[in-house]
Amino acid sequence: MQLSDFNYELPADLIAQHPLANRTDSRLLEVKADGGSHVQVIDRQFKDILSIIKPGDLLVFNDTKVIPARLHGKKETGGNVELLIERISGDRQAWVQIRASKVPKTGSIVQIHNQAGETFPVEMLGYDGRFYEVRFPENVFELLERFGELPLPPYIEHQPDSEDAQRYQTVVAKNPGAVAAPTAGLHFDETILKQLNNLGINQATITLHVGAGTFTPVREEDLTKHKMHHEWFSIPAETLQVIEETKQKGGRVIAVGTTSLRALESQAISQQSSGETNLFITPGFEFKTVDCLLTNFHLPKSTLLMLVSAFAGIDNIRAAYQHAIAQKYRFFSYGDAMFLCRLENTKS
């Protein structure tokens, strides 16, 4: 597969800049395929998920919590610099993306500041070709709470405000560490979670801390040359147990978002319930755990578009995206959702 196989044209006005009034107000595009040339797309509202998911199915959510991961500061030379946490690697260390006219040198100090006029020094430790490792003088999480800014995705054009602080978190978020929200989970509120539970639909969680690398563009036309970013994940023993029980009883394992899917499939490959994953899923990948996927619409030429194409079929995804654009669905983080089933498990 080539990078150009995963491109499409998206009108800019379809990129959702703000969340809808209520989490469950989103639209939902259900995609059904028969494994051949026929694909059916059904326009729904998100609340229709109550009739799509069946008793005995299992929803697996990512309970990561977005941290205020964007920092502003100055180099020793006086130039402005912006740091975006990619992933936290220790109590006082992290890997970051850096935006500056000239990148700080290894061993130099960047002074981070906030609007209150407080500052603290960050030491530049090294560069791995894409991200910089830096050392903080105190606990990373504590300093981010005082100095950090909510890291909205680059395609959202407004500065983060109080609405974003509340709505760019899922209602199941509890483990801080992500620099981007697991956006499929943003459509759920407490009411619909209770309704699903009352219908006999089980719920479980994993944690995968979404890194800034999720927004890093794929620059290699030959996908075999792409270097996938790393993200930390953990799957509780009780989640693994309920997955096994669900499958034994004939229920479906439904990943809420690509992050949940990557964690579950990483575990299936490695048999490790926690650690770092750089799993790059492209067409031809053999899925072992996840039967269905709830997901948002993804950027052109992105690794996530490749993932959903592997899951539901390239032609099916192309048809679904063409339909969504024609019907003016809202795209990306604050946008609408899709419901897909694994190609070999899908019936028309």
Image (spheres, rainbow, N blue to C red):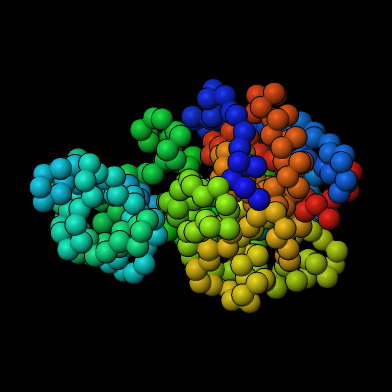
Whether residue 228 appears in this view of the structure is yes
> Quarter of the image holding residue 138?
bottom left
Residue 244, compared with residue 262, is above or below; it is below
> Quarter of the image holding residue 87?
bottom left
Residue furthest to the front: 222
Q: Is residue 173 left or right of residue 286?
A: left
Q: Residue sitting at 75 percent across and 48 percent down?
A: 312
Residue 214 lies, in percent from the top left, at: 49, 50
Q: Is residue 23 left or right of residue 147?
A: right
Q: Residue sitting at 36 percent across and 67 percent down?
A: 89
Q: Residue sitting at 58 percent across and 28 percent down?
A: 10
Task: Report how many numbered discs are placed on residues in the image.
Answer: 0
Q: Nearer the viewer, residue 22 or 246?
A: 246
Q: Nearer the viewer, residue 11 or 222?
A: 222
Q: Residue sitting at 62 percent across and 47 percent down?
A: 2
Q: Nearer the viewer, residue 283 or 211?
A: 283
Residue furthest to the left: 77
Q: Nearer the viewer, residue 307 or 194?
A: 307
Residue 111 lies, in percent from the top left, at: 15, 52
Residue 88 lies, in percent from the top left, at: 37, 62
